[in-house]
Image (cartoon, rainbow, N blue to C red):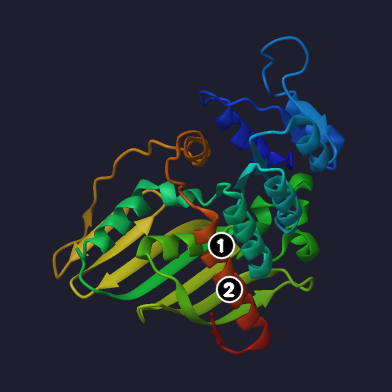
Amino acid sequence: MGCGLAARVHLGRLLTLDGVQVVGCADPDLDAAKALAALVPATGTGPAAIAFADHRDLLKQLTPAALAIFTPHLAHYRPAMDALQADCHLFIEKPLSTNVQEAADIVGLARGRGRKVGVGHQYRLLPSLVEARRRLGSGEIGPLRLVTATLAQDWLATHVGAENSWRFDPKVAGGGILADAGDHLIDALLWSTGQVATDVAAVQNRLESGLDLVTAAAIRLVDGTPVTLAVSGVSPGPLFEINFFGERGKLRATETTLLEQLGDAPAQTVPLAEATESIDGNFIAAVASGAPLCCPAEEALDTVRLLEAIARSAATGQAVRLA
């Protein structure tokens, strides 16, 4: 469901996996659905995938085992709930939803139906973050005392164009850079530390439309560790990094590297394993053989909670306590 750029990227990965048959594509823009369906190789007579303008027709006519959702953020909820009612497993491109109530509804219905819901937080598969999480868990830098997390990119330049124009409308996008690229940073922060947030105070610089471009936040994790978060969509160059400061050392994780510094010794580059799994392959393995999901919806809900709390704090000028 949703047949734009993200769907084309994920379709390319799905078509490389054994045992996967893409049977239908749905989009309110029927031409977009037809264009994506045409990319699915035919395996016999007739079209390999059928195009629909309404996901409910797809669910009713094809009864698929799973539905993958790549719509604009605010349009995740309805097809997710309809697919779960049709006993489908779900893959939802991040974020799970744009508000806590909808996200909780999806989690609750999936639990009641016994369906798997994977969320596209593929940064959890980055070797640098996988190794950082392992080293934090084993206490290699000692008890954690501070985390700084930064994301910067020229978001305006990278998202200009007809296909991405929805990202600049708060009524469709449900936020801005924080809810778009920024939620990768937030999910990576929570996942790598193995914690959830309890308190947040934030400020944002917004466009006249209400879309956020710059966010700064102070966050407290459940064990009391303070976090500083900075997300900018007006940077001349990209940056993604999380710094973990422990009593005995420091870790600096980027998308491609991990540096470790213990005591007064010089920082050392940590050797990293090769990535062996895509987020799509992980989802298929979870559905087909019961393998653990990289990012189950229950965990993605924590990211939605923090995203919503940051936006609420910035809008009200008040610190927010997360339930």
What amino acid type should be assigned to the residue bearing mark 2? Thr
Please give the name of the residue rendered at 36% of the width and 82% of the height, measured from the top-left corner: 224
Q: Which numbered disc flags the more N-terminal residue, 1 or 2?
A: 1
Please tell me how many numbered marks the rendered image carries: 2
In this view, the residue farthest toward the top is: 45
Alpha-carbon neighbours of circle 1 within 10 Å: few (<14), some, or many (≥20)? many
Q: Is residue 92 or residue 158 the one in the foreground?
A: 92
Secondary structure found at label 1: helix
**Position of residue 60 in the picture relative to residue 296 (left or right):** right
Circle 1 residue: 182
Please give the name of the residue rendered at 68% of the width and 48% of the height, measured from the top-left corner: 84
Circle 2 residue: 215
Q: Indicate the position of residue 240 as horizontal and vertical percent values.
A: 46, 58
Quadrant (top left, top right, bottom left, bottom right) of the C terminus: bottom right
3D distance between C-alphas at marks 1 and 2: 9 Å
Q: Could you tell me if the residues under marks 1 and 2 are in contact, i.e. CB atoms within 8 Å?
A: yes
Q: Is residue 138 or residue 5 the one in the foreground?
A: 138
Please give the name of the residue rendered at 39% of the width and 64% of the height, measured from the top-left corner: 242
Q: Indicate the position of residue 17 as horizontal and vertical percent values.
A: 52, 26
**Position of residue 215 in the picture relative to residue 105 (left or right):** left
Quadrant (top left, top right, bottom left, bottom right) of the N terminus: top right
